[in-house]
Image (cartoon, helix red, strand yellow):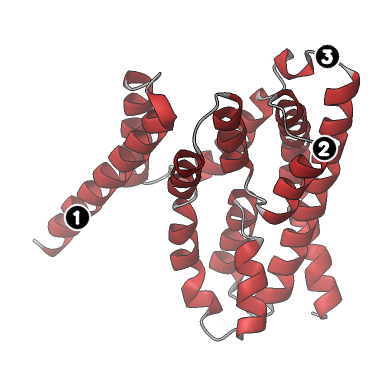
Amino acid sequence: MKPSALVLAGARDSLPMLIGAAPFGVIFGTLAVGAGLSAGAALAMSAFVFAGSSQFVAVSLIGAGAALPVIWLTTFVVNLRHALYSATLLPYARDWSARWRWPLAFWLTDETFAVVEHRFRRQGASGGQWYQLGSSLAMYLNWLLWSALGVSLGKAVPGLADWGLDFAMVATFTAIVAPQLKKRPALAAAVAAGAVALLARGLPYKLDLMLAALAGVMVGMACESLADRRVTA
């Protein structure tokens, strides 16, 4: 398959994610304006950070008047999951040159990871860099477009951030996670993370999110280890 066809295939397979991310980008733009960011700063965050969940966290902390070190540390922790994504994709990307790996690493999102990992697992990584480029560019341009629209709407329509559009974020991440819950360790990790998130809800600096992620990882690893022991016993 030609590189151009692989790029188009990556963009095409990301279409459901593009639709899910659209209201997500709009609500980010409205929240950023509501938190006091200028239009330029909000768009610069989408262009140079390009990580929806951490952008939401950063905006909420900015709106609450948090100090910069707190914002940096919190967004760093929120984005730590990308290290797991990179480790998962490494067997497929091991032979790619740095000029491919660096930009694709920057553009790696939850949605692109879900699309690309599924494709690599089923069809191998041949031409995978072009496929991932298509998914990445589609998600990036889509995010910039809807963020810009959100900024414009946030200035023109007061109170738009209260319309409940952030439900799209929940729906999008549910669509990403649900197909991965076929094995018991993954299911146990999801249940543990969800339970801890509910119990720890309301803690400052998004500590509930951090504790939930930690609990999910620990339970998932414990279940994997237990399953391996049963196989080798």
Amino acid bearing label 3: Pro
Task: Name the residue rendered at 59%, 53% in the picture.
Answer: 114
**Residue bearing the label numbered 1:** 225
> Can the viewer see residue 183 in this picture?
yes
Q: Is 231 left or right of 79, judged from the image as shown?
A: left
Q: Earlier in the sequence, mark 2 or mark 1?
A: 2
Residue 214 placement (x, y as % from top left):
31, 42
* Circle on res. 122: none
Q: Residues within 10 Å of mark 1 (few under 14, many from 20)?
A: few
> Can the viewer see residue 175 in this picture?
no
**Residue bearing the label numbered 3:** 158
**Residue bearing the label numbered 2:** 39
Q: Mark 1 to mark 3: distance in Å?
A: 52 Å
Amino acid bearing label 2: Ala
Element at badge 2?
Answer: helix
Q: Earlier in the sequence, mark 1 or mark 3?
A: 3
Element at badge 3?
Answer: loop
Residue 88 placement (x, y as % from top left):
46, 65
Task: Name the residue rendered at 63%, 32% in the picture.
Answer: 169
Task: Name the residue rendered at 81%, 79% in the picture.
Answer: 3
Q: Is 222 left or right of 22, judged from the image as shown?
A: left
